[in-house]
Image (spheres, coloured by chain):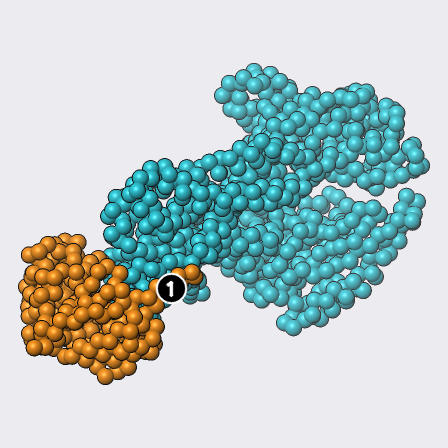
Chain colours: A orange, B cyan
Amino acid sequence: MLHARNLVKVYRTEDVETVALSNVNIDIEKGEFVAVMGPSGCGKTTLLNILGLLDTPTSGEVFFMGYDVGKYKERKRIQLRRGNIGFVFQNFNLIDELTVFENVELPLIYLKYGRRERQKRVEAVLERLTLAHRCRHYPVQLSGGQQQFVAIARALVTNPNLILADEPTGNLDSANGDDVMGLLGELNEEGMTVVTVTHSPSDADKTNRIIQLFDGHVITESIRGRL
Amino acid sequence: MFLYHYIKVALRSIYKHKRYALLNIIGLSVGVTLSVVVLLFVKFELNYDTWFSNSEDIYRVTSKGKIGINQINGASTPLPLLQVMEAIPAVEKGTKIIPGSNKLVSYEQKKFNEDGFFFGDSSFFNVFDLNFISGNPSEALNGPGKVVLTVGTAKRYFGYQNPIGKIINREGIELEVTGVCEPMPDASHFHFDFMGSLSTIDVIFKRDTALLNDWKENWLALNCYTYVRLLPGAVPFDIEKSINQEKEKYLLPQINEILKEEDFLNQEILLDFFLQPLQDIHLYSDLDHELEPTSKPIYISIFIFVAGFILLLTCVNSVNLTTARSNRRFKEVAVRKILGAERRYLIIQFFVEAFVISLLAMFIGLVLVELLLPVFNQLFQIKLQVSQIKDIEDIGYVLVLTFLVSIFSGSYPAFFFSGLKPGQIFKGNFRMSRSGLVVRGLILTSQVMVMLFLLIVAAGMLWQVRYIQKADVGFDKEHLLVLERGYAVGKNLDAFKGELNDIEGVENVAVSMSLPGDEYYQVSFRYRGGESDRKVFLLPVNYVDGDYFETLGLKLKKGKFLSGNCKDSLGIVLNVQALEELGIKKPLGERLEIIGMKASDGWEVSLSGVVDDFHFESFNVPIKPLVIMLLGKKTHFNYILVRYAPQVNDGLSGEIERVWDKYSNGEPLESFELKDRISSLYEEEFRVLKIISVFAVLSIFLTFLGVISLVAFITEYNGRQYSIKKIIGAAKQDIMMDVLRVFGGYLILGILLAIPLSYLALQGWLSSFAYYKDLPVWGIGVLAILVGGVSFVAVLVQSYRAVSDNPVLRLQDY
């Protein structure tokens, strides 16, 4: 599903050049649950942004669902991303002006679904995550855990092929964190591909493959899941 | 669907960020209000005299030339001109009108002094085809003794009775009402309440037919206003050419006759006629003897410029306020992009948001226009009505304006935010360019500059107006009541004056033909002494009685003032300027000969005294030479001046009215304070001062809004830096000083630019005065310090709010 070859990402300012990723090679197949770990600044989020088609590599190739997306223009990347990748962030990134229902509905609007279809899908996903009773609430009226569940609902509503989660438990207490990781595991068991960036070894343990990054290099790869 | 979604989000965002949204909407509303008022004003000004059928083919005939040393550039023409013009085939129709003076008009018990009385020939309503309520417009002015009233006037005299056929009386002349018409529209270059038939003048002068005939045939007496309607396609230049050739037949013989007189040897008399489009009169005409004050196109340009500038500033403030919350918006944009929003959707979203805000501002602006229009009308002496916004064109203008405001205020956020890449945003490595900050700073500079500019100009104008009000005009203008149409007391003048003098508090009573500020009669004098022998001078003259000098409080320079004695009847008093103009070294006893006036032609008058120069015209013009002579027994005079003691009781006006009623045969009393009349000479200056002051107040408001917007933007722009500094120990005041440092340069630059510009503008305005007083340097300094000080305080207050947030919480946002 996702293949990165000799991925390099360099950030340049006037005087400084920072190498965020250096010759990274990764293959993630459909149905995997992968954790990317590593110290701060090692390039985890950069890798996730590139794998999620939010950013482009300086050099190297990225294949997503068979497409060579490394050189895609932004518009084309958006089109490919839309409906195929769901994102979950550490700080939830819900839109404050929209209700729970509307936040979850938003990706479907950009996919130009009809009103009835949107309603059906949103209700179904909220029901599944036991958030239906909160559908008229605004994000500020929810707890952190609930907000992250809404963010996951938003990621799920388009029925994507891949979920990318950037430290999804980073802003949550352990109970809520466990719930979120449990949910991601459940989704994976249903066949969804999930890639999560995390600092937490216990979260990483819940996945079936761990990629360790250090200074932009992949240093180890636990293949427990493959065995 | 998108639209609904965006509108919903915009409204919720406005609700959530009430403070910013309110500032934004109020700022834009002010710009919109001003812009709609300017629309109304410009539309009003451009629609002058467009109301009549074929208005574009109607022209006023004007006169240009010179008689001796006097230049003629007038709106009036000789009476016989129209007849000659009507013979030109391209002239379809013509009419002439003559304004009447302020006289008493009565119907049964109703009596009013009327100064809106005109005489027009029978074709007046064919050219100016006003709507008739009753009567026949083409016959209404046929024959003497006919009059057409406007609706309001008819109602005033006749209530709900049918006025047709009723007889009104205008100081002994009976006039039959033959029609009632709509009044001239507000945007017309003249207005009348009564239009009497021109041939009524024959009745008025029936005892003086020689004078009447001379007046009717004289090509050098410019006493009427002539209008012609040309056939479509006629070329005005060709008609001017024809008339100027044709007129020679009539004008030349009269000129030759005058030139035969020895005093006009080597002098020149020229007179030509020109056509002026009716629709151009209000904005482009500045001739002598205009029927009503005209305007200038520059005022329209200034209005449009200032309104455009203020609208632009409000849009810039709006951009600053919108982008000030950039951090929050970055996040939203990023989320939307990640969820699949293309750039165009985000652009549309920001525009929809700006449009919703503009629409709200437009709504508030239109309500403000409705509420404030009476205030604007009062302040600026204009007659604008909201009902002027009625046709599709105006609604289009309002929508285009809303759209433009949305484009201006929405485009920067739309393109700026939508262009950011989501990965960049989440990494926190986005940064606005330094040049963007500089542009914003320079916009603040221009706001401060305009504010201080307007404040200095308004202060300079106020300084001059106060100088005019306080300055010594050469006589005592306080405590002087003027009774209009004093001739109403007729032969009983002496008894009337005597009784007025007996009233407690009345110190003096005098009679005068003209008042300071009036247009004085011009009389030609021949002076045989002086350096150049036998020179002719055209000098302004005021006819007064012997009490005038003391009543007005004039200062004697030499000789004596004229008294009411018979021996002074051929005496004159000159002012110092007149002595200089005539070159009189030893004034007392010098003789001048009056020429040109039939009644007194060849009379010699002798110089009895010299009065110190006093301002008998406005401060706009230098004091001119003046001749003061005694009124003859039968000379018509206008004003009775009553000097009263400063501590007079309230009953004075009642007492004066009682005496007036006794002697004036029941005519209503009209009176005013002389100082008010003198103030009215500066109406235009007061008007400009008021307009500038309103703009200054607006600009103060907008500048402070600008300061608040920019501080909000800068504290957001540098928010991360300020939060970190606070965490590592910087005090609030250190951060505030940081903000101030960013601002200081821009503020000071604005102040420095405003000072020379406003000084130049003020000098330009003051140059229209012959007597003026500059705003002192300390005044400019105080204003500059005030503007600088208040701006700095505004910066500090706003930045204090911003730096009072919890830095840890703020940092989490980045």
- The answer, for residue B143, to whether it is visible in the render is no
From the image, tell me which residue sits under label 1. A17
> Callout 1, which amino acid?
Glu
B32 or B596: nearer the viewer: B32
Quadrant, the N terminus of chain B: bottom left
Could you tell me residue B719's position as x and y percent?
A: 33, 49
Quadrant, the C terminus of chain B: bottom left
Q: Secondary structure at mark 1?
A: strand
- The answer, for residue B55, to whether it is visible in the render is yes
Up/down of B197 relative to B380, above or below: below
Residue drawn at point x = 14 percent, y = 53 percent: A141
Up/down of B730 relative to B45, above or below: above
Could you tell me residue B151's position as x and y percent?
A: 48, 51
B606 or A194: nearer the viewer: A194
Q: Is B470 situated left or right of B449 in this image?
A: right
> Numbered disc 1: what chain?
A
**Residue B239 occupies which quadrant of the picture?**
bottom right
B372 or B736: nearer the viewer: B736
Residue drawn at point x = 6 percent, y = 70 percent: A186
